[in-house]
Each structure stands twice: as C-alpha cells, then as structure tokens.
Amino acid sequence: RDAKELTDAFTNALSSTSERELREAGVATAATILEEGNRKYVPLYRTSAWNGDIQALSLDSNGVAGAVQWTAEGKLPVWNSRNIVTWDPSTSRAISFTWSALSASSRSALGTITASFTTTFVNFLRGERANEGAALSFRVRDGVLGDFINSNPVFVQGGLDNGYANLPSIGASYPAFLTAKAARTGVLFVGANDGMLHGFKDTKTGAATDGAEVFAYVP
C-alpha cells in the first residue's frame, strides 16, 4: 500500500474510535416491579459531537425491552417555546431563561461571551440553530441536547409510600395524598452536560406528547 492509503486507513480508524454512540450514564425504569407497560429509559451520548439523547423503550411483564417509544431529541419543543428557568440570586426567585428576563448578575454569570453576544447566545443555549455555521456565530451541533454522562435518570410519579396509612390516627388524608400522587403525569428527570436538568413527560400510554420536555433548569 502507498503512503496515502496508509494515512487514510489510520484516519478512518481514528474517526471510528472518536465518534461513537455510548451509554454510560445508567438506566432507569418507570416502576420497580415487573408489569406490562413499564418503561426502560436509556441516556446516551455521542463522542466527538458531544450531544446526547434519551431513549424510552417498552418493557413487558418479564422485563424484556421492546421497541423505542420515543426519543427526547425527537420530541423536543421548539426552542422559543421551551419551559427553561434559572435562579435569580438578586431576587431569590425563579425566572425564565431568556436574555430579557435575566438580571445583571445572571447575565454576568454567563461569562465574557455576553460582551459580544447577548440574546443570540441565550437563544443558542435554548436550542435556536439559525446562527450555527462556519461563517456564523456558533458551532454546528448534531443535536440540541447535551451529552448524558454519569447522570442517572429518575422517573417521578407515584413517589414513596412510607406506610403512614397504617397509623391509627392518620385518617383518610395520607391515603388521599398517595392517590393524588399516583394520578400525576410521570416525568423523567435527568441532567445533561448542556448545563440543564431536564424533565421529560411520559404517561406510558403512547400519547403523542410522551417524551416532550416539560421543564429544564439552569442552575
């Protein structure tokens, strides 16, 4: 083989090594018991591009994974309709993660990049892609969601039953509380390296909105 063929071979080998889709964040299920209609949630990330996704797979009563029911990237809302919030230390309250809503201290916390980019930078973090490109302001992303590494997903719905209903003086209040919790729409919470804690809705019914992000928090 000539030198070019050898160089190309090494380049292809290194490229295939550096660009892989990996699952190292741990998985979660929607319930701790085996039952029909359960879910398995698999966080993943892609090296080199460093974007990520969440896959929700069906589980049967034997715990066998079936088809992918939704992916978080595929159900992500349009960037300007996402419910993203952050904390404003100057007022000690939650505020919308938009440039116009951020206080001076919150804007400063974003770093020196805000000296050049203000609204466009925050919109980029929210998922706007109009300013991505070699001749534009920001890098091209393979996906809006960041990589999910070392962040185990947690499905929240019914919650913990501490058994207080067995106390003789508890009455009907605690059972009613458990019933109300169990009736809530389930949300899968997981942190990503895009700087956000994400919450993804899952009714486990196959609803069109299952997998949609309902909440994200920028600490």
Image: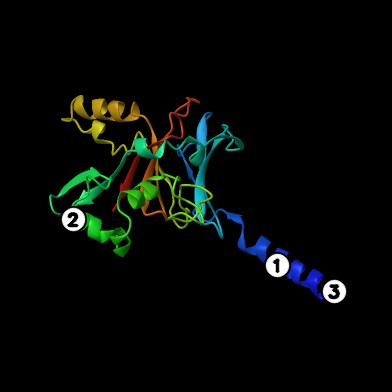
The answer to whether residue 34 is visible is no
User: In 3D space, how far apart are the residues under numbered discs 2 and 3 (Cα atoms)?
Assistant: 60 Å
Indicate the quadrant where residue 77 lies.
top left
Q: Is residue 53 above or below residue 49?
A: above
Side (left or right) of 156 relative to 93 = right
Pinpoint residue 92: horizontal percent, then vertical percent: 14, 50
**Residue lying farthest bottom?**
3
Mark 2 or mark 1, which is nearer the start of the sequence?
1
**Residue lying farthest right?**
1
Residue holding disc 2: 104
Indicate the quadrant where residue 90 lies.
bottom left
Side (left or right) of 155 relative to 177 = right
Does dot 2 land on a helix, a strand or a loop?
helix
Query: Which residue is painted at 49% across and 56% down in the image?
Result: 135
Mark 3 or mark 2, which is nearer the start of the sequence?
3
In this view of the protein, which residue sits in the foreground, 164 or 38?
Answer: 38
User: In 3D space, how far apart are the residues under numbered discs 1 and 3 (Cα atoms)?
Assistant: 14 Å
Residue holding disc 3: 2
Q: Is residue 150 above or below residue 126?
A: below
**Residue lying farthest front?**
135
Pinpoint residue 182: horizontal percent, then vertical percent: 34, 29
User: In 3D space, how far apart are the residues under numbered discs 1 and 2 (Cα atoms)?
Assistant: 47 Å
What amino acid does circle 2 point to?
A: Ala
Side (left or right) of 122 relative to 1 = left
Mark 3 or mark 1, which is nearer the start of the sequence?
3
Q: Are marks 2 and 3 in contact (CB under 8 Å)?
A: no
Query: Which residue is painted at 21% across and 33% down in the image?
Result: 167
Does dot 1 land on a helix, a strand or a loop?
helix
